[in-house]
Amino acid sequence: MAVIASTILVVRRIADLQRRRQILSERQDRLRRSLPEWTFAPLQLVGMSAGEIQAMMNDLDRAEEEAGLTDVEAEIEQIDRQLEELESTLLATPSRSLDAIQAVLELAISRFREQTATDPNDLFYDYGDARILFLLERAADDLRALLAEEQREAS
């Protein structure tokens, strides 16, 4: 029972960290959009001397730090390390129940869904990846239905 609970708890912790990371990523994007206009024009560095480029980079670093980007990036890196540790724990812990298997499958699907374009008009769309995602989602739906049916019968 401890392994079952532990697997599900690890999956929940990973999901919580992923939500925190998403919030921080959105905050990072907002902060980047609030930076001065010159920070978005790295191609204008062409033709500048090494000293001018260094000064521009120092200004950029200072602007990012003043906007709070450095702190957000550090938090994101910390969350990424925690996610990696928890995922490694999850990989080393076998699932001993259908609920634990479902939790791990849902976690894997959500991660794969984040990285997979499912719109054929999307530049990054890959038919094979989208099809694998749909197959995984179908398996998860079937498993969810079986578990719900088992719970109804047990009641």
Image: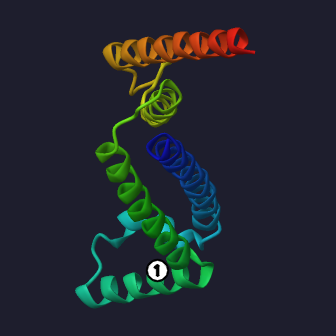
The single residue placed furthest to the right in the displayed view is: 155
Residue 70 percent across, percent down from the top left: 50, 78
Amino acid type at image mark 1: Leu
> Which residue is found at the position 51% from the left and 33% from the top?
103
**Residue nearest the viewer, comparing 128 with 119:** 128
Number of other residues with Cα within 10 Å of mark 1, as a class: few under 14, some 14 to 19, many 20 or more? some
Residue 50 percent across, percent down from the top left: 24, 86
- Left/right placement of residue 82 relative to residue 25 reads left
**Residue nearest the viewer, comparing 62 with 44:** 62
State how many labels appear: 1
Residue 127 percent across, percent down from the top left: 35, 13
**Residue nearest the viewer, comparing 108 with 51:** 108
> Which residue is found at the position 43% from the left and 62% from the top?
82
> Which residue is found at the position 43% from the left and 17% from the top?
136
**Colour pattern of the rendering:** rainbow
The C terminus appears in which quarter of the rendering? top right
Asked if one can make out residue 120 in the rendered structure from this viewpoint, the answer is no
At mark 1, the secondary structure is helix
The single residue placed furthest to the left in the displayed view is: 50
Give the quarter of the image for residue 43.
Answer: bottom left
**Residue nearest the viewer, comparing 13 with 21:** 13
Residue 124 percent across, percent down from the top left: 38, 27
Residue 96 position (above or below residue 31) = above
- Left/right placement of residue 13 relative to residue 149 reads left
> Which residue is found at the position 42% from the left and 60% from the top?
80
Residue 35 position (above or below residue 131) = below
Residue labelled with disc 1: 60
